[in-house]
Image: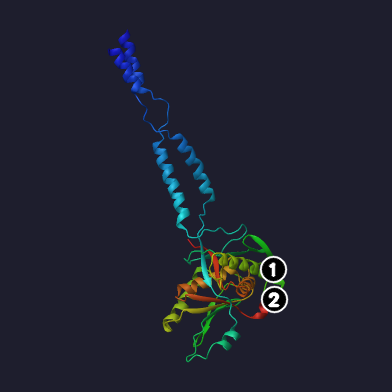
Amino acid sequence: MRRRKRRSAGLMAKFTSDGGLTLTSMMDILTTLLFFVLKSYISGAEVTTPPPGVTLPRSSVDAGMHTSVVIAIDHDAIMLGGERVATVTEAVASHELMIAPLAARLTEVRAQMDDIDRRKGKPPATTHLATIQGDAGIEFRLLQKVMYTLDRNGFPDIALAVLKKA
Amino acid sequence: MSARGRRQRKSLTVNTDLKLMPLMNIIIAIIPMLLLSAVFIEVKVIETSLPRDSDAATAAAPAPETVPLDLAVHVRADVYVVEGHGVGPLLIARKPGSAAPDSLTALELTHVLQNIVAAHPGTTDIRIVAESHTRYQEVISLMDAARAAGLLSPALEGSSPEDV
């Protein structure tokens, strides 16, 4: 009787686990996923997302973004670094090529950049880079005015942000 | 002796399983956070130049020995006009009011520009002369067509100051 009891206890021990999950394979998957996600962060030199409401045009170009001042243009407003500086209606209606509110804000930004350069002990850069994130549907006359304003306010190097064609 | 030895052996048994649950919890929290903030859209840039002031450029530049090709693609209402010194004008049909040239038109334009580049080796400059109402996507598509033909420095220009 005692022997039978002992045998059944041994069988129980053999076929029952302690209730813990086997997590090693799950951990392997999650660790791989974590490294993959982290790598996608590190591989890009400069990562940016177009602001909401801006659909960038598509292009086959392959040059990556650089750190720069970003001007976004949608159907309503012209934004500098996420801050709304002028409306599209005003900019288009004006007979001037220069967009005055944008020019004023660009002058401030350039002064700040020069100040940072001075604090770093570097001579202020003569030219600065600006990236235009324009909606694919905007008219060329608006783009031309923004480019002209950038050029005349110390940002002659202009990059047009696009989405890579698949 | 035997019963005591069994007890001792039992008490020395160590559970060597790693406690993975806390690590799992951290990773499960980190992954959605990273995925939510990840950027999967590839943003690229086209470096370009300002629509130039042709009068000022002409006045400032010394007179060249040979006449430059001055290749340009003009966007008109229903046609793209490719012209330069000793070239064209070559006309390529454009769908009026279209937001961008279709793939066939773009291919035709690239082919025309490739022929011009082949006939004038060393040419890398081209002007995209857009109308005031030309859509940005169309301008970008024309720049792509020029780049595909080996014209790596496309410049943008407005068709006339009155249009601005």
Q: Residues within 10 Å of mark 2 (few under 14, many from 20)?
A: few
Question: Residue A101, which numbered label?
Answer: 1
Image location of residue B155, percent across then percent down: 54, 76
Question: Residue B18, which numbered label?
Answer: none
In the displayed structure, A17 sits above or below A106; it is: above
- Per the image, the residue denoted by label 2 is A96
In the displayed structure, A152 sits above or below B18; it is: below
In the displayed structure, B39 sits above or below B79; it is: above
Q: Earlier in the sequence, mark 2 or mark 1?
A: 2
Depth order, front residue of B106/A134: A134
Image location of residue B108, percent across then percent down: 48, 74
Tell me which amino acid carries mark 1. Answer: Pro
The image quadrant where one finds the C terminus of chain B is: bottom right
Which residue sits at x=65%, y=80%?
B161
Q: Residues within 10 Å of mark 1 (few under 14, many from 20)?
A: some
Image location of residue A63, percent across then percent down: 47, 66
Tell me which amino acid carries mark 2. Answer: Glu
**B36 on left or right of A25:** right
